[in-house]
Image (spheres, helix red, strand yellow):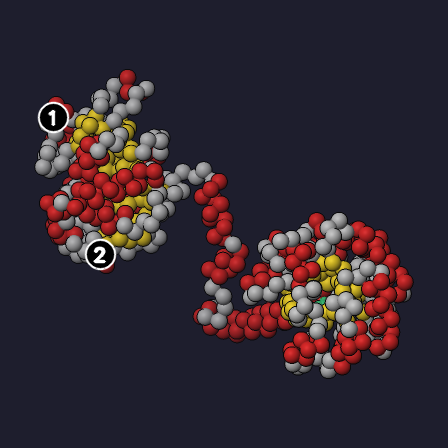
Amino acid sequence: MKKTTQFRKLLFSGKTEFICEAHNGLSAKIVEEAGFPCIWGSGLSISSQFGVRDNNEASWTQVLEVLEFMSDVTAVPILLDGDTGYGNFNNMRRLVSKLEQRNIAAVCIEDKLFPKTNSFVKGTAQPLADMEEFCGKIKAGKDAQTDDDFSIVARVEAFIAGWGLQEALRRAEAYHKAGADAILIHSALGVPDEVLAFKKAWADRSPVLIVPTKYYSTPTEVFRDYGFSIVIWANQILRSAITAMQKTAKLLKTGETLTIVEDRIAPVKEVFRLQGMDELDAAERLYLPRQGQNTAVIVLAAARGKDLGVLTESRPKAMVEIAGQPLLAHITGAYNAAGLKDIIVVRGYKKEVVNLPNLSFADNDEYADSGELYSLKKALDTIAEPRDIIIAYGDVLIRTYIIQILFESTAPFTIIADTNWEEGVNRNRFADYVECSEPLSRRTFNSVVTLKAMSTPADMLERGRIHGEWVGTMRVTADKFSALKSVLDGILRDPKNRNAEIGHLMNALVRSGETVRVLYTTGGWLDIDSVEDIVLAGSFA
Ligand code: SPV
Ligand code: MG
């Protein structure tokens, strides 16, 4: 519903509505979240948040700018306290059209002279506007509005200026006839007598608004009984902010530490929430073509790495130091450098020491008698929505450019194979050798190479079939997230496969009809299997 229409519904709801002051985007949001159906754009509060007096010291366009922020972040209507309309009928026309442009639902103008003074400051000394002139201003405003539901509230300052009920009624009647949609009757008394007398005499000729700042102790029931349309809490949000800010500033000045205030103030997270950071995150996912933004990297780091002997007595292989940092820090650093921040590390052996910052963890507590695929499942189970996945070994150092290469493929499954595999054969250890649709040659520049098989401990590829060695990183796009999970579940359903490794998964994917794209490269990675590798890694890292 249009904000103007919402405001009119409040005005004519037939019951007493309560609306609340705000003075900038943040306070408007807070007032809306508290449940208020409308916001009072208080002149006093908006001036105050600028640090100036409520004497039209802030220009009307500066007020407009604040309103724009308030209106942009809220869905409830705003009733602007438009002072005197910032000039004569002509200024009023321009004000109304500028307010409409900013989606402000209504404006209240008071029958005083520009520059106005706040009604609670030397009220009786304040001259009132000429009644006819003020009527012309109302008419000009009504004629200027293009939205039929935009409302103009005429504020009668007769009581403030020391006049009696008769003058208040005379003016209210004239403003009503001039087209005002409602009357705001203001009083600076500590009791509600003036506004109650007015309401009784005015009856229901048009809705009546009040600002009980001074007669604040009046029971709300009285306002209801008298049938006021809208009660305005006109400055309490500003005043509570002042008290809170003064307290915090004093505490900080005397305490010289943040610890005394931290628990008394809104957490930074709350600031972000109020700013709507969630919406920006969602929009970024929708519109920003950032590489890997929906990618989760799963690092398999549950194993001890027995072959490293005493080095892994108190920590898993992933936490062994290389060039002054744990192996895992080098690995996650490389992925971070490729723009990938969302990293899930599967921990197992000595999991308590795997505690680097900015990572999420999945635990494979059965690491001692389970394999890589079991760990992989633990990580995948932490991901609720399908997303792009990179699966990476937790004991392979990798250069960032190799990770970048993964993103050159748009294939659902992509792996990188090192053509310099024979060096590994000489090291006499198990390696993830791959057989591909074709070996690296000048022809593969233009062709799509796919995986045919990968070595597993149970099913080693003989030399003649090997075209490369998998470098230990694989990318799966979100549309194959479910397929990946179901192939994996299929494997793990058989208890015999509890210790199954990644090669087993690759072969099962190929067998299930999935195409696994292979990109060839040479070097740029190093797996850590022995103390000798760690020495090598020192220079690599
Ligand atoms: C305001 O909130 O600025 C008002 C109401 O005009 S009062 O301060 O009570 O005059
Ligand atoms: Mg005001």
Residue lying farthest to the top in this orientation: 443
**Quick check: 38 above or below 244?**
above
Q: Nearer the viewer, residue 183 or 373?
A: 183
- Pinpoint residue 390: horizontal percent, then vertical percent: 30, 40
Kind of residue indicated by mark 1: Arg
**Mark carried by residue 463:** 1
| First in sequence: mark 2 vs mark 1 | 2
- Is residue 324 shown to the viewer in this render? no
Tell me which residue sits at (81%, 52%) in the image. Answer: 143
Q: Nearer the viewer, residue 452 or 306?
A: 452
Tell me which residue sits at (80%, 76%) in the image. Answer: 201
**Mark carried by residue 351:** 2
**Quick check: 484 above or below 209?**
above
- Is residue 297 shown to the viewer in this render? yes
Q: Nearer the viewer, residue 200 or 304?
A: 200
Q: Quadrant of residue 423?
A: top left
Q: Find the distance from the CA under tag 2 to the CA under tag 1.
A: 38 Å
- Pinpoint residue 115: horizontal percent, then vertical percent: 82, 63
Kind of residue indicated by mark 2: Lys
- Pinpoint residue 308: horizontal percent, then vertical percent: 14, 47
